[in-house]
Image (tube, rainbow, N blue to C red):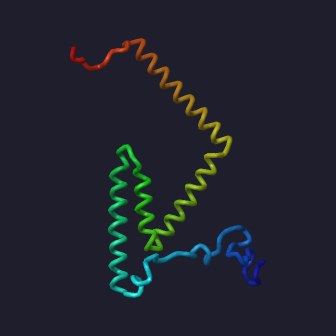
Amino acid sequence: MTTEGDGERGVSEGGATSAGEPSQESSREGLGSRAPSFVKRSRPLHLTWQVGVFVVGLAVVVGGVFLLPLPGPGWLVIFAGLAIWATEFVWAQLVLRWTRRKVTEATHRAMDPRVRRRNLVLTGLVVAVVVAAVVVYLMRYGFTAPWKLAG
C-alpha cells in the first residue's frame, strides 16, 4: 500500500518504497549502542565503555593492517575490528552494512555463469603459461637445486 503524498514512489507498510528500496526509517532501524542497560544509564560509564570499545576495535583493525602483507586473514581481522566498533558506533554499523551489501553484490556477480566461464578460461590460460614457463626452464637448465647441498 502506498500512502498519499509520498510522490511517485510511495512507502509501503513494510518500510520499503514501491521501487524496492528501503525507506530512510528502515535503513536506520537497529542502529545505536548495544551496551548493557546499566552502562547506558550512567553517562560517565557509557563514555568509558565507548572508549574501551574504540580502543579494542582499533587494536584489532591495526593488527589486521599489519597482517595484510603477510599470509593470513588480514581482511578478516580488519572486518572483525569493524564489527567490534559496530557494537557501539552508528558510523561503523553503516559501514558494515554497506560492506556486507557490496560483498553480497560481488558474490552474485561472480556466480553469473558468463563471469564464471570467463574466470575459468583466464585461470586455465594463466596455468598453461606457468606450466609452459616451468617446462622451458627445466629443458634449458635441468632440474638442479640452485644451492649446494652438503654431501
Instruction: Tell me what residue is drawn at x 43 percent, y 77 percent.
Output: 35
Q: Where does the image place residue 106, in percent across and percent down from the top left?
A: 58, 52
Above or below for 26 versus 72 = below
Image coordinates of residue 112 in percent, x first then y, are 66, 45
Q: Hey, which quadrant is residue 43 in on the image?
A: bottom left
Report the number of discs. 0
Query: Which residue is depicted at the point 77% across and 84% down?
Result: 4
In the foreground, 84 or 96: 84
Q: Is residue 60 left or right of residue 106?
A: left
Is 52 positioned to the left or the right of 90 in the image? left
Quadrant occupied by the N terminus: bottom right
The C terminus sits in image quarter: top left
Q: Is residue 149 above or below residue 75?
A: above
Residue pictured at 44% horizontal, 59% vertical: 79
Q: Tell me the quarter of the picture where residue 146 sits.
A: top left
The percent coordinates of residue 40 (x first, y second) are: 42, 84
In the displayed structure image, the side of residue 111 where residue 85 appears, left or right = left
Residue at (37, 43) in percent of width and height: 71
| Image coordinates for residue 82, horizontal then vertical, percent | 43, 63
Eyeballing the image, is 68 above or below 25? above
Judged left or right of residue 16, residue 138 is left
